[in-house]
């Protein structure tokens, strides 16, 4: 059996934590290694348990999910953070993605979607949903901070990043560009290093912020 994906759940509602655990642990390849009721506990458990994926709510007492995500990513950039929340307002979306979250789901999703998102984040395939990306892009445009400069990236890397922003897998990106999935993975690794990020979502947010990814790239 393949190594299980180790998951930390952080939510201030015990019933939500229990339900999320049940959904995830029905799958043979998923294992919940810890539960946190607030942001401080989530950070402490992430430090102690080093999960592969942390499923975090935004609205928690004390330290909220945004600050918890920021702290977790600062200490352990390799941990993928999946937001599971009722909040879809622009300020929350912007703040949590800026903090380093690799995925963003609302709590009305089906269990199968949650399972798929956890696996995707672990596999490095997580990316902004186009609707969420549009919210972020609109925020950056309103702030007037976007720049068309993309000197850090080659044209090939920029093409890979734009396709990644549309949610395509490495195999799908490769098919579009005439590359192998392995070569796409190499390009993404170079993008991550150049931009000093640890996930596709962070790279896409960076691209949106600097104007490298346009609205038409997300269609």
Image (spheres, rainbow, N blue to C red):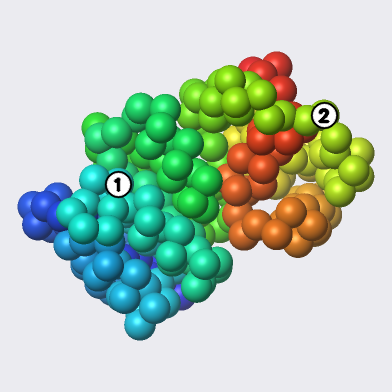
Work out whether 109 lies above or below 131. Answer: below
Q: Secondary structure at mark 1?
A: loop
Which tag, 1 or 2, sits closer to the chain's start?
1
Residue of label 1: 58
Q: Is residue 12 left or right of residue 66?
A: left
Looking at the image, can residue 90 be seen? yes
Q: Is residue 118 left or right of residue 76?
A: left
Q: Secondary structure at mark 2?
A: loop
Q: Quadrant of residue 138?
A: top right
Residue of label 2: 148
Q: CA distance from mark 1 to mark 2?
A: 32 Å
Question: Which residue shows up at 49% across the image and 44% down it?
Answer: 97
Q: Is residue 114 left or right of residue 117?
A: left
Q: Are marks 1 and 2 in contact (CB under 8 Å)?
A: no
Residue 50: x and y in percent read 42, 77
Question: Which residue shows up at 68% across the image and 30% down it?
Answer: 145
Residue 85: x and y in percent read 28, 41
């Amino acid at each position: 059996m393949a190594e299980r994906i180790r998951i930390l759940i952080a939510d201030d509602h015990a019933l939500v934590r229990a339900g999320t655990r049940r959904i995830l642990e029905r799958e043979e390849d998923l294992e919940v290694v810890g539960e946190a009721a607030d942001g401080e506990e989530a950070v402490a458990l992430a430090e102690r348990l080093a999960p592969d994926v942390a499923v975090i709510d935004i609205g928690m007492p004390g330290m909220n999910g945004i600050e918890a995500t920021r702290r977790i990513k600062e200490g352990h950039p390799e941990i993928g953070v999946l937001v599971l929340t009722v909040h879809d307002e622009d300020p929350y979306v912007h703040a949590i993605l800026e903090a380093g979250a690799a995925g963003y789901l609302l709590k009305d999703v089906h269990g199968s979607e949650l399972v798929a998102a956890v696996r995707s984040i672990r596999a490095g395939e997580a990316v902004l949903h186009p609707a969420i990306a549009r919210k972020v892009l609109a925020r950056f445009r309103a702030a007037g901070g976007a720049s068309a400069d993309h000197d850090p990236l080659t044209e090939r890397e920029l093409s890979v990043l734009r396709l990644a922003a549309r949610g395509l897998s490495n195999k799908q990106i490769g098919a579009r560009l005439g590359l192998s999935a392995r070569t796409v993975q190499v390009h993404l690794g170079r993008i991550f290093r150049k931009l000093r990020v640890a996930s596709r979502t962070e790279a896409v947010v960076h691209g949106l912020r600097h104007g490298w990814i346009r609205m038409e790239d997300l269609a």
